[in-house]
Amino acid sequence: MEEAKKEKEQQEAKEQKETKETKEDEKEKLKKEIEDWKKAYAIKLADFDNYKKRIDREFKELEKYACQDLILSQLSDLDILEKAIETTDATDSNKALLDGINMVVKNMVAKLKEMGVEEINNEGVYDPYQHHAISMDKDDEKEDGEILQVLQKGYKLKGKVIRPSMVKINKK
């Protein structure tokens, strides 16, 4: 009987040891799982922060150029008024009309500048990022690729070209 009791105690001690080892293994497994969840959470949090930053950048970009279509239509109107000034004779009977058109043009240019619109510089050499070459001509006194004539003014909105200048360039 004593032997059975000893055997039973040994069996219980063995089971307790196995249970303790199993609990330790389970505890380690749960700790590892918690660490994995923490890492996954940190990654998701960083992804979300990057998403918010990207959305903010995109919104600011959209906000910056939201009025581009309206500005382009205003530039067409400005072109028409400037052509009217160029083609109208400066006689006494037309002076008041020309003065009125000039005032409208100056006002439009001022409003466009307030919105961040600037005219593209058309002096010097052709730049394909700012100019659109419509035609070429030969002038031995000018450099190759130099702008000979501006056919239509170009404009930038806050540094971005929204309408390239239409130009005639020199080709040797």
Image: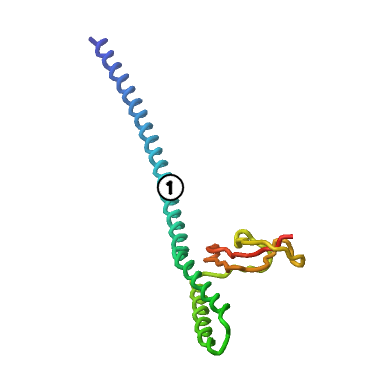
Which of the pair 171/163 is nearer the observer? 171
Give the image location of residue 137, x and y in percent.
Answer: 69, 63
Q: Is residue 142 left or right of residue 104?
A: right
- Does residue 128 sit above or below 42 in this rendering? below
- Which residue is at a point 53% across and 89% down the rendered structure image? 93
**Vertical arrangement, residue 163 with respect to residue 29, above or below:** below
Q: Residue furthest right?
A: 140
Q: Residue furthest left?
A: 1
Where residue 132 sits, quadrant-wise, is bottom right
The residue depicted at 30 percent of the width and 23 percent of the height is 16
How many badges with numbers are in the image?
1
Q: Is residue 144 above or below residue 18?
A: below
Write down the residue under mark 1: 47
Q: Judge from the rendering whether residue 41 lies leftward or rightward of residue 118; answer left or right.
A: left
Q: Position of residue 130 (x, y in %)?
A: 60, 62
Give the image location of residue 102, x and y in percent. 53, 81
Name the element at disc 1.
helix
